[in-house]
Image: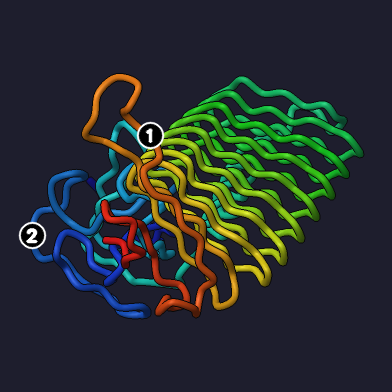
Amino acid sequence: MSDDQKPVLSYKGFDANLQCRGFQYAPGETFEHKGKVEACAGGFHACEYPLDVLRYYPPASSRFFTVEQSGQISRHGDDSKIASSKIKIGVELNLAGLIKAAVEYTMSRCKPIDPESPAYSTEENGLATASGTGGAATASGDSGAATASGTRGAATASGYSGAATASGTGGAATASGYSGAATASGTRGAATASGTGGAATASGYSGAATASGYSGAATASGTGGAATASGTRGAATAEGRHSAAMASGFYGKARGVEGTALFLVYRDSDSDGDEYGRIVHAKAVIVGQEGTKPMVFYSLNSAGEIVEAD
């Protein structure tokens, strides 16, 4: 533990009410802990590496903020978690912002292995960048970042808490590791997060975001985009105009802005054998109709009714 003179920029997760372990926070406010400061034992906790936050707060049901930690500092041995005696709550980030911060974090600490495409990195915290047309970037180490910014580029982050970004037209970004994050910001881009707690964001026109892992979150914020959460307890969000969100896994939920389409499924979890997981109910609704409200998560109950999700 040490007293750091310079504040540490980090990232913190909260529940929907901006609480953490029952403590109420507020944007722009500074809080001070009077007791022992020790990582995982006492003090205010946050993570220096943005995607490490997903280890503690699932992307489907949490809010994320930048924070400034100062005073007494205690660091965690297994990841970038920090405990501090003081914390100031900064600005809120959506999943795309969190992923962008993760890529910037890694890029600021790594030297690209090759300025030409394709690029490949197996080192922990490694960075692979492919900026040419049709380039491919792969980062397979823990907390690695892969970026493909050219047309039809492909970026893959397969390590724990990796971040993959494809910003070119028709690009594809895949994060297959635990708590990985994939972002496709170009037109008709595809982002896939297949690991547990992964987050996929497609912000470009007609983009597709898919989260297939447990508690994954998929967001389509571009016009005509599609977000699909097929894993157990997954969450799909349609933020773009004329977009759609589908929750097809066990206990999935979906939400969207007014006028977007939600596709909801209820699966049998009580039966055994071939009957387990069969689709019992399936319904579609346009947000704003049948009593549905914008940006509120919905799911199907056992009777096939559309209800607000927990």
Looking at the rendered structure, the secondary structure element under dot 2 is loop
- Image side of residue 2 versus residue 217, left or right: left
For label 1, the residue is 278
For label 2, the residue is 35
Position in image of residue 26 (x %, y %): 30, 78
Position in image of residue 96 (x %, y %): 58, 57
The quadrant of the rendering that contains the N terminus is top left
- Image side of residue 84 versus residue 7, left or right: left
Residue sitting farthest toward the left = 35
Residue situated in front as seen by the camera: 132 or 6: 132
Q: Residues within 10 Å of mark 1 (few under 14, many from 20)?
A: few
Position in image of residue 76 (x %, y %): 28, 39
- Image side of residue 54 versus residue 2, left or right: right
Q: Is residue 26 above or below residue 242?
A: below
Q: Amino acid at mark 1?
A: Arg
* Residue 165 figure quarter: top right
Q: Is residue 187 above or below residue 272?
A: below
Earlier residue among tags 2 and 1: 2
Residue sitting farthest toward the right = 133
Looking at the rendered structure, the secondary structure element under dot 1 is loop
Position in image of residue 253 (x %, y %): 40, 55
The total of numbered circles placed on residues is 2
Image point (61%, 30%), residue name: 126
Q: Is residue 78 visible?
A: yes
Q: Amino acid at mark 2?
A: Gly
